[in-house]
Image (cartoon, rainbow, N blue to C red):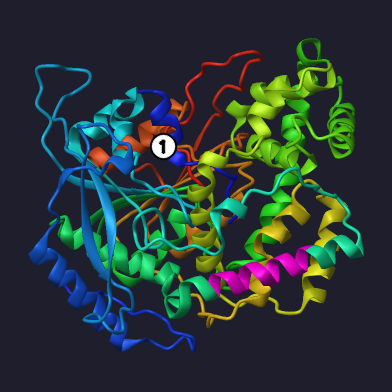
Amino acid sequence: MRAPALYSAAGTLLLTTLAAAPAGSASGASGAPVAAEVRGTATAAARAQAEGIAFGKCAEVEDLPGNVQCGTVSVPLDYARPDGKQIKLTVSRVRATHKDPHNSKRKVPRQGALVFNPGGPGASGMYFPLIGVVPEWKRLAAAYDLVGYAPRGVGRSAPLSCQDPRHFFKAPTLAPTYPSESYKRERIAQAKAYARGCAKRAGGALRHYTSLNNARDLDVLRAALGEEKLTFMGASYGTYFGALYATLFPSHVRRMVFDSAVNPDPTQVWYRNNLDQSAAFEGRWADFRDWVAKHDKVYGLGDTADRVQRSYDRAAAQLAAEPAGGKVGPGQLQGAFLTAGYYDDYWPHRAEALSAYLKGDPKQLILQAGPHPEAAKEAENGNAVYTAVECNDASWPTDWKVWDRDNTRLARVAPFETWDNVWMNLPCAYWSAPRQEPLDVRTGPGELPPTLILAAERDAATPYDGALEMHRRLWGSVLVTERDAGTHGIAGGPNPCVNGHVDAYLLEGSLPARRAACAPHPEPKPREHSRKKPATRPAA
């Protein structure tokens, strides 16, 4: 699923505020069980359990404070060959505090490790353990060791790259809502070159960056942590390979939270999921414009959603003629406002920047939308992993005419993100590594402990239908819906009702009825710069 550029989930927030055999089998290219990978996962998990993780001081490059411990866990590059090439995944941890935030005299018993993945594909969870200082997380931090990690390919975990990071940021760029044929040909050429770059730089290892391997890696990490059963929270894409884990290893699950669930239907992964995402962003873009119109006295961008759209279009036209600061064109404008579709706490900042730009002051817009060369290596790495995993996971149309037909139709009713999403994923049309057949995520009665699914009703990045589908497929799961809200990633955020369900489940194993609803969190207020961002914001 499309992730907002340069967003690092827990990291951005926190740096500024402070071995049993698998109980299932994988599917290979034919969809048949792959016995070698089943045995390989069991072998790797048993080895990891025996070795454990030697936690110690974090490497300076991780930029983590002294209270965080770091270590590595070895996993096979290819689970069919568990004694072959090994890669090391970096892991971070803060031990349970045992401190009850509401009763200083009470010592909270430890419940084990809570492992978190922020999504992507391509995002790192190394900053996650810092989340324990946030008030909404202190009860969980008292009972659990908070554990983050960088999945395979990400950061220092056998890093993947598809091009020279120095050439990753191209700015200023265009973002035509209805691209010309010549523009399409240009983007097709870029997609082909990117796919070739991935194949050339990664070589034969490229095929092993998959969601199924991410799920297998998670079981090896569980074993290395000394956990008989896994307690896991995945956000966005993390819900997808978390669901794969639940299908492959149901007897290894203690508790699982799926925050902003990806639609796991094999027919949706990943091409149709991205079409649905583009359609959903149109609704969320309308929500943002309605909010701006409601506060026209503050921003002066128009008192209706249509007039706000015209203000945005006027800014895009001006930036096409003369990029702000020489580096913010329509493409950068679209990227910045895409994040407003993910997170409503960006709404005041984006509206302020647009308003100021149209009044002649581009500084805020340049700051918010301009490329950050110092982050190019991390951004290129994340994009490479995103591309490799999604392209490897499933079949994609290889005929440009299919992409052109489907997205031309979609752009007529959902122009905001449609074509930009195409260019993000188009390398998959020209991918040289073999494609897998997606695993049919499904558990039957008694196979899996009860799990918790969280979803915002108007989430655009992972549309609500995906949560309903996940709920149908995971037996005994409970779905908690934040009504009339659209923030992507709602655990540990500003909604106490949602947080109450998360705490009750992870701390007590308590769940509501099969489905429950929470009223929406309050809308952001204009000119409010310092309101805390949601704590477990996902990357995809």
- Whether the magenta-drawn stretch holds residue 392 is answered as no
Q: Indicate left or right for 231 with 378 as reference.
A: left
Pick the front one: 49 or 287: 49
Alpha-carbon neighbours of circle 1 within 10 Å: few (<14), some, or many (≥20)? many
Residue drawn at point x = 34 percent, y = 59 percent: 157
In this picture, residue 205 sits left or right of residue 2: left
For the point 46% across and 65% down, the residue is 473
**Amino acid type, residue under disc 1 in the picture:** Gly
**Residue displayed at 32% across by 54% down:** 450
State how many labels appear.
1
Q: Which residues are magenta?
A: 187-199
Residue 246 falls left or right of residue 239? left
Residue under numbered circle 1: 11
Q: Is residue 393 above or below residue 457?
A: below
The answer to whether 532 is drawn above or below residue 472 in the figure is: above
Q: Position of residue 506 (x, y in %)?
A: 28, 42
Give residue 52's quadrant in the image: bottom left
Q: Quadrant of the N terminus?
A: bottom right
Q: Is residue 194 magenta?
A: yes
